[in-house]
């Protein structure tokens, strides 16, 4: 399930760390990028690769917000719900996304295109309300800006 | 402009250079890596530690611990490798200065890393970058590659006989990994659950070896201290809060952003002169001066200077330097609900007081905000806060309790009104304020 080339990349990665297990999070990121999410088979593969039990890998994968144990959409929207962004109007923006996409935060659109997640502070408070779309920051969000972004994602 | 307005910027001086992108040739063209040439092989490591001690540099991540003293705790001859870990897991709500330094002036961090590694005898350093900093991680990767090409990393750096390798390591989204032992666990490929202390990382840190964990901004100061001398550094700001500091100002201000200033700046100057004051002619209600873990201040505190000790003296803390400004339309119960929701989400769950306490705080604050509060809830909140402080493996529990106590201390009547009227007077259901 993991490309031979990726495996070679992991071999080089693991060799850099004094202890093999340190490569866990970089490997989880890379496998998630390749498979789409951390499926039971993916977790099993990583456990074998790192000489660990699947439960060890699951304990890590379930701890971090950016690691997905369920399939997510082709596009991922992280909407900040922390203090500064809420002070600047994040809630109505998040609800606008929910209404327009017909999903609640934490869910994926039925066509599998977009997942919306509420996130804690994204370290972009100077540009609040802030969101990340597929890893790219979008600051000083407005309903108009948001509609343009959603339009692009829905037609991709 | 005030005295602080004329302050000559150090860490963000690059912002005055048109078109600056933070590449190695640009960094060098403006004085970068001069400290490395001056120090490596020419100053003894112990002299470097001594210079940083004399500079008075205190950690910029949250605790304000003296950097040179932290380095001094590394045992001289443990026979084990020594590691330097850069804490770039910036996640304290309100803080956005490390991300800026990572994306815009990464070689300043790396030069600090090389000099600090030399000082403590480290030959393998880790740049732990927050998971959400996708671009930041790419920038750091490019920066490290440039430094290897130029011979600033690798074997026998600048002919000094000093070797150093650096690994960029990205997290995956967990506030608790900003706690230094949580970060070390994460770097070892585990859940980011903080370790009981002692032993402190200086004795038993990464892979049970002596380890120093320093914040991104802290390390960015090192090249300047070594090039211009500790006396130059101590001349900036108050005697016990030396050097420049980046303040991340956000919320209800006209010009949110990062402001590099001496810590002698007052809260009033920071909000009203540098950040342009509050838009719409509205009045100031409350300020969080050092990230969401820090107790709230009110307009009565506007003349406090933003140094570690003065903020402690008024019952708060300098923390991560994140200043969140709230105007008169802000509901403090709703603020408490948001802040407690955050700590509840981020509690790693190891300690009962924190795992249960953060959940209860959020639950009770939510019901008060929703008009279902009970008269006894305010004493219940204070009792819970008391049970959460000083009783856990790390300070997340304290960080969750302290702000709530402070909101009750300064705005108790607002909480009481929510309970009495069985509703939020700010129509807070739509947000912190009405839209």
Image (cartoon, rainbow, N blue to C red):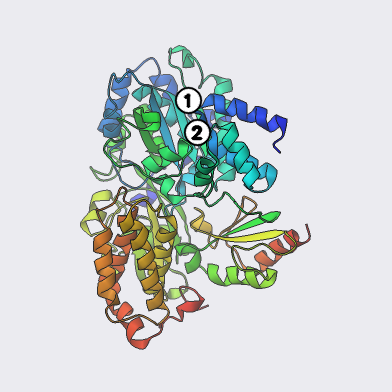
Residue B207, by quadrant, is: top left
Residue B341, by quadrant, is: bottom left
Q: Please give the chain letter of the residue carrying mark 1.
A: A
Residue under circle 1?
Answer: A18
- Mark 2 nearby-residue class (10 Å; few <14, some 14–19, many ≥20): many
Circle on res. A31: none
Q: As drawn, which residue projects farthest toward the left?
A: B313
As helix, strand or loop, the secondary structure at mark 1 comes to: loop
Q: Is residue B121 left or right of residue A82?
A: left
User: What residue sits 40% from the left and 20% below the top?
Assistant: B38
Q: Please give the chain letter of the residue carrying mark 2.
A: A
Please state the horizontal and vertical placement of residue B368, each as a whole percent of the image.
Answer: 37, 77
Q: Nearer the viewer, residue B177 or B138?
A: B177
User: What residue sits 40% from the left and 59% below the top?
Assistant: B343
Circle on res. A22: 2
Q: Is residue A92 above or below residue A152?
A: below
Q: Nearer the viewer, residue B280 or B348?
A: B348
User: What residue sits 59% from the left and 71% below the top?
Assistant: A95
Real-space Cα separation, disc 1 to disc 2, in angstroms: 8 Å
- Mark 1 nearby-residue class (10 Å; few <14, some 14–19, many ≥20): few
Whether pointer 1 and pointer 2 mark residues with C-beta atoms closer than 8 Å, the reply is yes
Q: Quadrant of the N terminus of chain B?
A: bottom left
Please state the horizontal and vertical placement of residue A84, each as a whole percent of the image.
Answer: 46, 63
As helix, strand or loop, the secondary structure at mark 2 comes to: helix
Do the residues at discs 1 and 2 belong to one chain?
A: yes
The total number of labels drawn is: 2
User: What residue sits 30% from the left and 81% below the top?
Assistant: B416
Please state the horizontal and vertical placement of residue B259, each as a whole percent of the image.
Answer: 42, 51
Q: Is residue B289 above or below residue A26?
A: below
Q: As drawn, which residue projects farthest toward the bottom?
A: B421
């Amino acid at each position: 399930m993991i490309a031979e080339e990726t495996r070679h990349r992991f071999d080089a990665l693991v060799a850099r760390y004094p202890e093999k297990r340190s490569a866990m999070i970089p490997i989880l990121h890379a496998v998630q990028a390749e498979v789409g999410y951390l499926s039971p088979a993916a977790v099993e593969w990583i456990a074998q690769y790192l000489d660990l039990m699947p439960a060890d890998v699951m304990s890590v994968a379930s701890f971090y917000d950016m690691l997905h144990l369920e399939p997510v959409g082709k596009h991922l929207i992280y909407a900040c719900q922390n203090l500064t962004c809420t002070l600047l109007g994040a809630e109505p923006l998040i609800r606008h996304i929910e209404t327009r996409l017909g999903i609640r935060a934490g869910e994926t659109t039925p066509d599998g295109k977009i997942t919306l997640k509420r996130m804690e502070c994204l370290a972009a408070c100077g540009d609040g309300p802030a969101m990340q779309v597929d890893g790219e920051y979008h600051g000083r969000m407005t309903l108009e800006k948001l509609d343009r972004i959603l339009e692009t994602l829905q037609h991709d | 402009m005030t005295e602080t307005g004329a302050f000559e910027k150090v860490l963000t001086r690059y912002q005055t250079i048109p078109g600056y992108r933070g590449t190695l040739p640009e960094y060098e063209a403006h004085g970068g890596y001069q400290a490395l040439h001056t120090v490596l092989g020419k100053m003894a490591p112990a002299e470097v530690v001594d210079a940083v001690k004399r500079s008075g540099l205190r950690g910029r991540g949250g605790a304000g611990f003296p950097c040179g003293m932290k380095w001094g705790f590394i045992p001289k001859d443990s026979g084990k490798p020594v590691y330097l870990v850069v804490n770039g897991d910036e996640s304290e709500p309100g803080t956005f200065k490390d991300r800026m330094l990572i994306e815009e002036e990464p070689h300043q961090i790396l030069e600090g890393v090389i000099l600090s590694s030399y000082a403590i005898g480290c030959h393998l350093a880790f740049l732990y970058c927050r998971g959400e900093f996708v671009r930041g991680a790419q920038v750091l990767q490019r920066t490290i590659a440039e430094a290897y090409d130029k011979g600033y990393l690798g074997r026998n750096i600048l002919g000094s006989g000093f070797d150093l390798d650096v690994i960029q390591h990205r997290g995956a989204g967990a506030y608790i990994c900003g706690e230094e032992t949580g970060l070390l666990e994460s770097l070892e490929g585990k859940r980011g659950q903080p370790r009981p202390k002692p032993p402190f990382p200086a004795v038993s840190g990464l892979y049970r070896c002596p380890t120093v964990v320093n914040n991104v901004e802290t390390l960015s100061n090192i090249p300047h201290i070594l090039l211009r001398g500790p006396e130059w550094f101590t001349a900036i700001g108050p005697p016990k809060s030396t050097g420049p500091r980046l303040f991340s100002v956000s919320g209800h201000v006209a010009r949110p952003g990062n402001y590099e200033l001496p810590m002698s700046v007052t809260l009033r100057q920071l909000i009203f002169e540098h950040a342009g004051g509050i838009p719409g002619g509205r009045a100031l209600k409350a300020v969080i001066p050092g990230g969401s873990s820090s107790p709230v201040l009110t307009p009565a505190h506007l003349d406090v200077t933003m140094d570690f000790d003065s903020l402690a003296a008024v019952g708060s803390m300098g923390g991560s330097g994140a200043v969140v400004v709230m105007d008169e339309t802000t509901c403090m119960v709703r603020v408490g609900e948001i802040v407690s929701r955050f700590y509840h989400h981020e509690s790693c769950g190891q300690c009962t007081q924190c795992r249960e306490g953060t959940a209860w705080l959020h639950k009770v604050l939510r019901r008060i905000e929703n008009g279902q509060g009970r008269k006894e809830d305010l004493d219940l909140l204070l009792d819970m806060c008391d049970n959460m402080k000083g009783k856990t493996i790390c300070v997340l529990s304290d960080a969750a309790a302290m702000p709530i106590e402070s909101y009750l201390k300064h705005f108790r009547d607002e909480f009481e009104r929510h309970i009495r009227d069985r509703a939020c007077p700010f129509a807070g259901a739509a947000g912190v304020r009405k839209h």
